[in-house]
Every structure is written in C-alpha cells, then in structure tokens.
Amino acid sequence: MIKTVDLEKVFVVRDQEVRAVDGITTHIKSGEVVVVIGPSGSGKSTYLRCLNGLETLTAGHVHVDGIDLADRKTDMNKVRREVGMVFQQFNLFPHKTVLENLVLAQMKVRKRKRSEAEEKGRTLLKKVGISEKESSYPSQLSGGQQQRVAIARALAMEPKVMLFDEPTSALDPEMVGEVLEVMKQLAREGMTMVVVTHEMGFAREVADRVLFMDYGKLVEEGTPEHFFEEPKEERAKLFLRQVL
Amino acid sequence: MIVVGLWIATKRIDYTWRWNRIPQYFVYHDKDAKTSDVDGTVTSLVNIGNQTTVTVRSEDGDDSTYIIDTKTANLKVDEYLLEGDTVGSIAEWKAGPLSVGLWVTLWISAVASVIGLVIGVVTGLCRVSQNLTLRQLSITYIEIIRGTPLLVQLFIFYFFLGTVLDIGRIPSGIGALGIFAGAYVAEIIRAGIQSIPKGQMEAARSLGMNVPKAMVYIILPQAFKRTLPPLAGQFISLIKDSSLVSVIAITDLTKSGREVITSTFAVFEIWFVVAFLYLILTFSLSQVVAWVERRLAVSD
Ligand SMILES: Nc1ncnc2c1ncn2[C@@H]1O[C@H](COP(=O)(O)OP(=O)(O)OP(=O)(O)O)[C@@H](O)[C@H]1O
Ligand SMILES: [Mg+2]
C-alpha cells in the first residue's frame, strides 16, 4: 500500500540542518494498522506528512499504491484524496457546519452531487456517533466530538489509507476514549492505518506492527508483543521505561 | 458647549446664518413651460387632480397632448393656438447640486471600491503566492501606491494617462481611486490570509483540494470575515478620499459644495452640510458592515 525507500526530510532553519526523517525504509501493507511511537522531536509527524506529500521529500521515495510521490509528474491532489489524514488540532473548517465539513471536499474533489455527498456525510456522522450535531459549527463541539468529525471528514473521501497524527493529544483525558473507540472500529473494519500516538494501550491492543523512531531514524520495529515485552534496542527500552 | 461656543464666535464676526437657503440646493421646484408644437385648435381640457391634460388638434387632424398644472391653464376649448404659443406650465421637483454631488460621490466611491476590492484580492493573493515574480510585482505596486500622495496619483491619472489613453475625467478619477484603494486592500487581504492557521490549508490539501480550491472555499471565506473591519475602514477612507477628485473637475459632493458657495456665500452652512452628508455615507457603510459581521458571526 505505502512503501518508503530511504526517505529523508531535512529542514534548514537559519543555516542549521535538521534531519527530521533520516533514511526510513518501510512497507505498510493493505489492511495493516501501524503505530509509530518515539520521543518528541524524533520526526514522527514529519514522516507521516511525507506519506501524503504535505512535506516535500529531500531524498528517497514514497510509493502510494504504486505511485511515486518523489516523481515531479505525480498529481499530488489525486494521491491525497486516497490518503485521509487526521490532525492533532482537528483542523475542522470553522466557517462550515459539521455536515458541510464532510460534504465540501466530496463535491469539489470527488465531484459528487450534493444529495449523494450529504447522504454519505450523514452515514459517517452516525458511524462516529454525532449525527445530532450535523448543523452545529465546530466551535460548538467538544474536542472529542470535533476529532470524530475530523475522522468522518477524512473517511467521506473513501480513502484507502488513514494517517493519524497524535489524534488524542489535544483532548481532555475523558474524551480520549471516544476517539480511540472510533479508531478501533475502523481498524476492525480492515482500514489501513498509520497512527502516531502516545497511547500505548491503543498500540498494544490494535497495532499489527509498531515502529519506534528516534532522531529521524527507524530504530526498532515489530509486533506489539515483541516491542513492549522484549525490545532489543537500548533506546527503545529507555523510552518504554519513561512512558509506561 | 461647542454649539454655544460656535454661536458666540460667529456672533463676534457678524456672520448671518442663512440655513433657509440650503434646502433649495437639494431639491427645487422648477416651472417647466409647455408650448404648442403645432398650429391647431384646443379640442379638450381634462382635469385630473391639480393637472390638466390639454389636447390640441392640428390642421392636419393630428392630436397632441400636454399635461400642465390646472392653475396655469388659461385656455378654452376651440381656442386657436399657433406653434410656440404657451399652453401652460408644470412645476416639477428637480435635484439640486448638492443631491447630484452626493449621488456622484456615492457611485464614484462604489465603483472605485469594487475595482479596489478586485485589485486588492488579486494582489493580495499574488503577495502570498509561491511565485517570486508575482510576489515582487505585487510588492512593487503596493510600495509605489502607498509611497505617493493620492492627489499626485490623481493628477498623473488625469493629465498623463487620461491624455495618452484618451479616457475622460470620471474614468480617470475612478481608476485612480480604485488603484489607490487596491494597494491598501491587498495588504489587508494578505494579513487576513496569513492570519488563518496553517492547519486549515493542510486539512484542505489533505482532502485532495488544489491550492485555488482551498483558497476559494477554505482560506478566503475565513480571511474575509477577519478582514471585514479593516476593509470597512478602508472603504470609509475611500469615500472621504473621493473628495479629492474635485481637483480634476469632477462635480462630486465637495465640488458641488464649492459651487453652491460661490452663488450663496453661505460658506459655513454649506461646509457643515457637506460634512454631514459625508458622515451619512460613511455611517451607513459602517452600519451595513456591522450587519454583515453579525450575520457571519453565527459560526463563532
Ligand atoms: N516546518 C519545519 N521547519 C523546521 N523544522 C521542523 C519543521 N517541522 C519539524 N521540524 C523539526 O523536525 C524535527 C522533527 O519534528 P516532528 O514534528 O516530526 O517530531 P515529532 O516526532 O512529531 O514530535 P512530537 O512528538 O513533539 O510531535 C524537530 O526537530 C522539529 O523541530
Ligand atoms: Mg508530532
């Protein structure tokens, strides 16, 4: 589904090079749930953003469904509509109602008719459990509700992969559960997911594979059982001791 | 306090206020004399209210009708009229110079605002675009316009461009005002776009929207809402700045005021009235904007 080959992303800030992603080669298979963990600043977000071309690659390749994002001729907009993304800060469109948030891209990008887009939107709102809020504005919702709308908005495009960048980090603790529940359900339905999170419980329960990143490098990868019970790398052990 | 102070001050210089002479410069009653177009006979006089419809039949048998005030109808049926004879007259309300000037100021400002808004949005978008050439062109335009006085720009527009391109004084005036406003609007729009969190553009792009679509549906509507107060300020300035077009002999409110003064010498009254009329225009605009703002606030 998504392959990365020697992926590199270097930021230059005031003549200082920051190697945010430093040579990552992975293969995320269709239907797989991959959880990316690592200390703050290790490049998890940047890695994720390279997968849908929100960051331009410094070197290496990202193949989404066989299409190379590093190729200049690739139409990024076509790739992005197949790759849904959920942000830490929700990033709902504040000037649109909840339903309009779901409908807009369907109509403007997928060229669906309004009636069709609204039906799809309502179905998804029901699925994430907030159908009664369809005509509210995002500012009138709680954080947990906003994040569920954001997930529904991404799903409305019928993506093949969903990327989650710390979807619960901006939430009050009592709302984390409702969002994780929606994500677990998605995983059960067989959605391909790449999730950056600090929720170790979620990783243990749902992940097929865990990637541990540090300083832009992929330090260790394996099944949750392997990673949480008997990590090989020192840095992974240290990290786990700190978070668990 | 101020009123009393002014009253005492004007007493001292022996100024006679003549407010009663002002209204006629808004509207006045004008007698419009009607004369017969043909040689012929009056065949009928029909009174409707205060007006009379006079029908005159020419020697060829064609009827022509005239509507006049009954008071002025001194004709009888069968009376013979020569071409050019007075049938009667009708009094009509006519817009005086101040009304006409107000209207000119209003529509010149309105057209210039639209032009300014279009130029401003386009320039503002260029200003934040990835393209270096577009960015530099827009910066150059903004700097030139903001760095020179509007009065000088008006003269350049009127005397240079107006002559070279052979456009009239009103298009020159509107063009200069629009281009002047455009530079300021561009900066307001740029600030508005940049005030929208980066996450909005990223969310739009992550849904597969291209940059123009993301701009039109996501960024600009939000930016517009935020820039409404400064934009309103800019357009209020534009209404006031439009008074400068009187220097290129466009008969706007200010110029009308000056003309009325030359015939009445009611200097104080007219300037107060002119100021009040500008105030009505600007105040109405800010009320409209406040209303739009309230409408847009539903999503907050
Ligand atoms: N746009 C940018 N410009 C410059 N440097 C950046 C940019 N984005 C990220 N970085 C740098 O790249 C490195 C990796 O950042 P990234 O956000 O990917 O880390 P992260 O693992 O997601 O951290 P966190 O857990 O805090 O979200 C950091 O050192 C960060 O400062
Ligand atoms: Mg991050």
Image (cartoon, coloured by chain):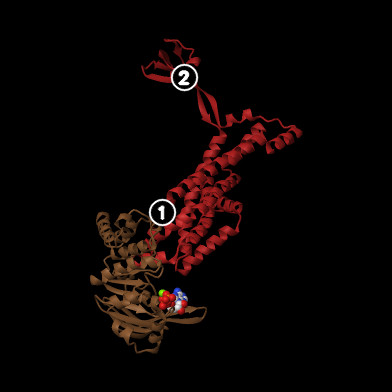
Badge 2 is on which residue?
B68
Badge 1: few (under 14), some or many (20 or more) residues near its Cα, within 10 Å?
some
Q: What's the residue type where badge 2 is placed?
A: Ile
Q: Secondary structure at mark 1?
A: helix
Which chain is indicated by disc 1?
A: B
Q: Which chain is brown?
A: A
- Residue at image x 45%, y 58%? B223
Rendered-image quarter of ligand 2: bottom left
Where B230 falls versus A202 (above or below)?
Answer: above
Residue A67 appears in view = no
Report whether B230 appears left or right of A124. Answer: right
Between residue A237 and residue A13, name the one nearer to us. A237
Q: Which mark is residue A103?
A: none
Label 2 chain ID: B
| Disc 1 from disc 2: Cα separation | 59 Å
Query: Which class describes the residues within 10 Å of circle 2: few (<14), some (14-19), or many (20+)?
Result: many
Q: Amino acid at mark 1?
A: Ser
Q: Considering the numbered disc 2 on the image, is that residue within a helix, a strand or a loop?
A: strand
- In which quadrant is the N terminus of chain A drawn? bottom left
Which residue was labeled with disc 1? B299
A114 or A217: nearer the eye? A217
Q: Is residue A182 above or below residue B238?
A: below
The chain drawn in red is: B
Q: Residue furthest left?
A: A189
